[in-house]
Image: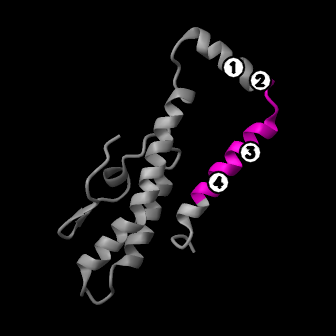
Amino acid sequence: MIALPALHQGRTVLLGDAGYCPTFLSGMGASLGLLGAKVLSVALPTEGAAVERGLRQYEATLRPVIDHFQANAVQNVGNALPTGHLKNVVRSWVLHLLPPSLFAKHFEHQFDVEAGLLEGIVA
């Protein structure tokens, strides 16, 4: 993943994979691209004036969301990619033995974090 210093330069805007570099481990590839398109469409003025302000708003709105999903992908690397036989066996047994309610709490927390990030963006 690459964390870009800016999502736009002049009137050139990076959207989707080009701008946010989500890996498959983020679980948000297409969704994040669609979200960026929606944010950009709302941020840009209809008359063409103050385009730079709209682009800054686009960046400010999406940057925390992008940072979250990139960090989430880095965290998921250790859980998703095999590293060694023993770790895979232990992980398999842990997943088999732990009650589903523990996983549900983790995903519920993740959902709450993401809902907070997207509050006001998705209507």
Task: Check the image and name the residue furthest to the top.
Answer: 86
Whole-angstrom CA distance, mark 1 to mark 2, is: 6 Å
State the SS at label 4. Answer: helix
Give the mark, 1 or 3, whose residue is nearer the N terminus: 1
Whole-angstrom CA distance, mark 4 to mark 2, is: 23 Å
**Amino acid type of the residue tagged 3 in the rendering:** Lys
Whole-angstrom CA distance, mark 3 to mark 2, is: 17 Å
Q: Is residue 43 above or below residue 116?
A: below
Q: In the image, what residue occupies the spot 53% across and 35% down?
A: 76
* Contact check, label 1 and label 2, Cβ < 8 Å: yes
* Contact check, label 1 and label 4, Cβ < 8 Å: no
Which residue corresponds to mark 3? 105
Which residue corresponds to mark 2? 96
Q: Nearer the viewer, residue 113 or 16?
A: 113
Which residue corresponds to mark 4? 111
Give the mark, 1 or 4, whose residue is nearer the N terminus: 1
* Contact check, label 3 and label 2, Cβ < 8 Å: no
- Per the rendered image, the range of residues in magenta is 96-114
User: Tag on residue 92?
Assistant: 1
Whole-angstrom CA distance, mark 1 to mark 3, is: 19 Å
Magenta: main secondary structure equals helix
**Amino acid type of the residue tagged 2 in the rendering:** His
Give the mark, 4 or 2, whose residue is nearer the N terminus: 2
